[in-house]
Image (tube, helix red, strand yellow):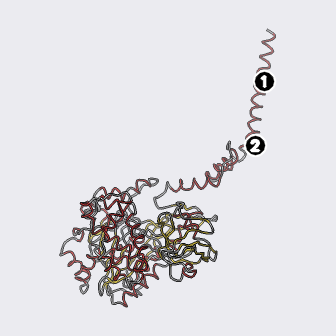
Amino acid sequence: MNKNKRLSIWLPVIIATSIALGIFIGNYYFVIGQGKRQTYSRGNKINAILDIIDQQYVDTVNMVDLVEGTIPKIFSELDPHSVYISAADAQVANEELEGSFSGIGVSFNMQTDTILVISVIPGGPAEKAGLLPFDRIITINDSTYAGNSSSQSLIMKTLRGDKNSTVTLGVKRGGEKELLSFDVTRGDVPVHSVDVAYALTKDIGYIKVSKFGRTTYNDFLTAIAQLKQEGSTAFVIDLRGNTGGYMDAAINMINEFMPDGRLIVYTEGKSFPRRDVYANGTGTCKEDPIVVLTDEISASASEIFAGAIQDNDRGLIIGRRTYGKGLVQAPIPLSDGSELRLTIARYYVPSGRSIQKTYELGKTEDYDLDIYNRFMHGEFDSADSIKVDDNLRFETMEGRPVYGGGGIMPDIFIPRDTSGITSYFSSVVNSGIIYQYALEYSDRNRERFSSFKDYKELYRYLQQQPLLEEFTNFAVTKGIRKRPTLINVSGKLIENHLQAYIIRNFFDEAGFYPVFLKDDPSLLRAIKELNEGRTLSFIEFIQKATHGGNLRSQTIPSKAYGLAKERVFPDFIV
């Protein structure tokens, strides 16, 4: 009884003491391990979480790597075009648009595990040091790069470098028994975005623009001046495969074709009030007829260009519906050299339509599959498979209907065509054997071909050679057996590729494009429309082009999509 009485007296004391001790211990560890809890709740949650992991996680964590891996996941929850670029990748990502980089000034390709110099940029560091086309780079700074399957990216990283730095190259040259040594001082190497400009006819000029970079507008002006001097009074601007770039470059180019006061584009976003951009009337081609070529890869700044021309009834758009990217990204550099490219606004072409296709936040994978789904749905084969939304109907300056909701629909639709494209053709293209044979053939005949005065002379020579037969024999040695029936169907297409690539090795793009595109249906249609409508007003031109009907209904075969998978520019510039 006494024992129970003593327990009843002391039990509350023991419980109270235990509670007090628990509170004391809890507070102690709170102060030691969780002392910043109040700060965390008021501050940035992401920083708070990272701090907690850094201070309390069971193992040591590389916080830099953790942050670098986390930021892209945050951006993946935004629109498909907002991205984070690490410091390691930012320089390379910007070089293509900035107009130059620091390197040695050659284009190269790997031929049987050897770095083969395809061309040497005139006036560049490599030419000054004495390198020649078809030299083989065996060593770089005493390290061997022949026969060890070095990756293209590693070679590019090794040959590019800081301006005025020096790289030593060991070079094997035909006819020389010993390696030749060259010390090349790296310098600025231009990155061209206007690939070529040449006359299609005596009065129609063609300009291929592959991207909109820092120097694109100046290069474009040079091309226009060259073609006008040669007699061009109408122009075909080829934006197929052009994924965009700097909006200002596209605006300046459009201005060359627009009369004073015409709206070119406007942008608008939550934190960016509407900004209208108008032509200032200083363009050099305000009265020259123009055709713009587009395809499903033409995006962003390309769509601004095509949309402004179409909505102002200034020219014809020929090809296929464009990609549908109407979001404006602002580059935001960070202190460590990394960069954000954040969507800050949408852009709208003059009719008021947005050309951005639909997307859902965080569903980038679905967005990326859109092109594939368009292909599977038959959009590349027939304009009738493209369903427009009447709720997004707008009008051009002269009252023609145009539609928003995703891309620029061309005035004259050019579907893809599978004629000439067989499984044999796909095999030799996808394996790179066509290009490989063109390199080897060029190398074997470099002395003879170097003596030709222009690409036309070389082209005439190649037309007399049994290229197709020799190539199919070569393909057999690479594991692709002859398929006579399929080769008969694809023969002209294969010969065209071989001829164009061989000519490119000696006369660059100025020789490559006129051969590669000589039978291109889009170009042929552009020439036809310009020839028939040049002296008419644009409205009469439109009526004549459509024979009074809907331009969308007119289709002609094209091999363009069938060739899209091929690497038209397989050389790497360093």
> Mark 2: which secondary structure?
helix
The residue tagged 2 is: 32
Local secondary structure at mark 1: helix
Q: Which mark is first along the chain, 1 or 2? A: 1
Q: Determine whether 409 is above or below 313 in the image.
A: above
Residue type beneath disc 1: Ile
Q: Could you say where residue 63 lies in the image, as x and y percent from the top left?
A: 65, 52
Between 349 and 154, which is closer to the camera in this rendering?
154
Q: What's the residue type where badge 2 is placed?
A: Ile
Q: Quadrant of residue 80?
A: bottom left
Report whether 399 appears left or right of 566: left
- 255 shown above or below 404: below
Front one among 445 and 321: 445
Q: Nearer the viewer, residue 166 or 272?
A: 166
Q: CA distance from mark 2 to mark 1?
A: 27 Å
Q: Which quadrant is home to the N terminus?
A: top right
- Residue placed furthest toward the top: 1
Camera-nearest residue between 169 and 364? 169
Residue 4 in the image: x percent, y percent?
Answer: 78, 12
Q: In which image quadrant can residue 22 be found?
A: top right
Measuring from the top left, give residue 463's x and y in whole percent. 30, 76
Determine whether label 2 and label 1 are within 8 Å by CB: no
How crowded pointer 1 is (Cα within 10 Å; few <14, some 14-19, many 20+) is rated as few
Q: Is residue 395 visible?
A: no
* x and y, in percent, of residue 89 in the image: 56, 63
Q: Which mark is residue 352?
A: none
* Crowd around label 2: few <14 · some 14–19 · many ≥20 (10 Å): few
Q: Which residue is mark 1?
A: 14
Horizontal side of 49 relative to 242 (left or right) equals right
* Front label number (2 vs 1): 2
Q: Residue at x 74, y 34 (%)?
A: 23
